[in-house]
Image (tube, rainbow, N blue to C red):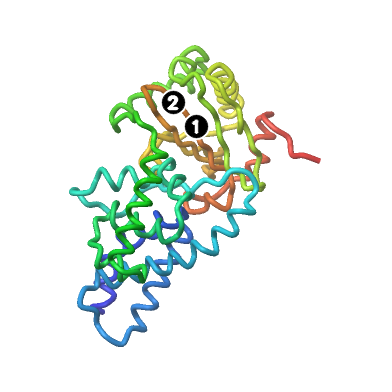
């Protein structure tokens, strides 16, 4: 009973570590479950339950990531992390690091790191673990972990956008964006988009690639304005909400089933990128999943090939 209570108290932290290493809600949940099974089988009580469980979930996640990277190399089209509705772990002293590290842009940067670099960066830079605990978790010396952390930080810093808006600015801009989207206001949308704004989509080859690859403020604005009326006409619902700590939305059909999600990247006071996840395999944790082909075909927005 005591072990179960300790584990449940640490579950939010363990999931948050695993999600940042893996970029997948389902794989992170599996890693946490495997950590619990290993904890149950452990014959001795650790000196620090937090350090022990964090090390176990990190090792499990590294192993999963190594095999996942092979699958991702064969992934059809762009790969995005699974959308995260809510990060269960909170730490007021590290709130900035936690929020930044869960954004889609940051998770895509983490994809450039080796599994070990990624794990070290997550434990050290995001969660503030000491190098002794990081070393124990990844099976390397503290000195080696310092070098891994340094390389990872350089990679991350080199890929970051220099100018980012704070959360309040992003939310205010997103509110104006979804108001213009709701009204089909092409001019209003164009004003809020960066000149080189683009729409990127992750369908995994299992759903329509609607809008993917469209770029330029005018083209994107017209595409978005043309989407809302037919989608609303068939009972579609656009539910603005925060995803991965960013402004975004969940699109649902008339039955409330999930069609896709959007996240908005905001830089320099404009929306730079709209990332949509429409691969049904990545949406089950958000809710029952709709047949995106059927929804968009009914709306007259696409047709199934063949």
Which quadrant of the figure contains the C terminus? Answer: top right
Distance from disc 2 to disc 1, alpha carbons, whole Å, reads: 8 Å
Single out the residue that lies furthest toward the top.
Answer: 187
Image mark count: 2
| Quadrant of res 106 | top left
Q: Position of residue 48 (x, y in %)?
A: 21, 73
Q: Residues within 10 Å of mark 1 (few under 14, many from 20)?
A: many
Single out the residue that lies furthest toward the right.
Answer: 306
Of 241 and 294, the residue lying toward us? 241
Where is 129 relative to 232, above or below? below
Q: Is 260 situated left or right of 157 in this image? A: right
Q: Position of residue 294 (x, y in %)?
A: 67, 40
Residue under numbered circle 1: 274
Residue drawn at x 33%, y 25% is 172
Where is 192 relative to 267, above or below? above
Residue drawn at x 52%, y 19% is 217
Task: Using the image, tell me which numbered label, if any, was put on residue 271.
Answer: 2
């Amino acid at each position: 009973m005591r072990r179960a209570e300790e584990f449940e108290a640490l579950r939010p932290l363990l999931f948050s570590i695993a999600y940042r290493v893996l970029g997948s809600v389902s794989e992170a949940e599996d890693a946490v479950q495997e950590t619990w099974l290993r904890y149950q089988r452990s014959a001795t009580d650790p000196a620090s339950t937090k350090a022990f469980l964090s090390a176990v979930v990190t090792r499990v996640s590294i192993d999963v990531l190594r095999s996942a990277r092979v699958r991702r190399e064969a992934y059809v089209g762009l790969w995005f992390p699974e959308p995260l509705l809510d990060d269960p772990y909170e730490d007021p002293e590290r709130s900035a690091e936690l929020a930044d590290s869960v954004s889609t842009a940051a998770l895509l940067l983490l994809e450039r790191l080796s599994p070990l670099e990624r794990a070290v960066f997550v434990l050290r830079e995001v969660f503030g673990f000491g190098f002794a605990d990081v070393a124990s978790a990844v099976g390397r010396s503290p000195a080696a972990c310092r070098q891994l952390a340094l390389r990872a930080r350089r990679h991350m810093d080199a890929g970051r956008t220099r100018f980012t808006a704070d959360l309040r600015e992003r939310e205010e801009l997103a509110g104006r964006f979804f108001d213009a989207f709701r009204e089909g206001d092409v001019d209003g949308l164009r004003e809020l988009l960066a000149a080189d704004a683009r729409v990127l989509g992750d369908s995994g080859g299992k759903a329509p690639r609607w809008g993917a690859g469209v770029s330029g403020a005018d083209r994107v604005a017209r595409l978005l304005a043309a989407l809302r009326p037919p989608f609303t006409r068939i009972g579609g619902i656009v539910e603005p909400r925060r995803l991965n700590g960013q402004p975004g939305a969940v699109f649902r059909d008339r039955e409330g089933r999930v069609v896709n999600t959007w996240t908005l990247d905001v830089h320099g006071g404009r929306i730079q990128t709209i990332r949509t996840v429409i691969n049904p395999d990545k949406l089950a944790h958000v809710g029952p999943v709709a047949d995106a082909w059927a929804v968009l075909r009914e709306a007259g927005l696409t047709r199934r090939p063949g």
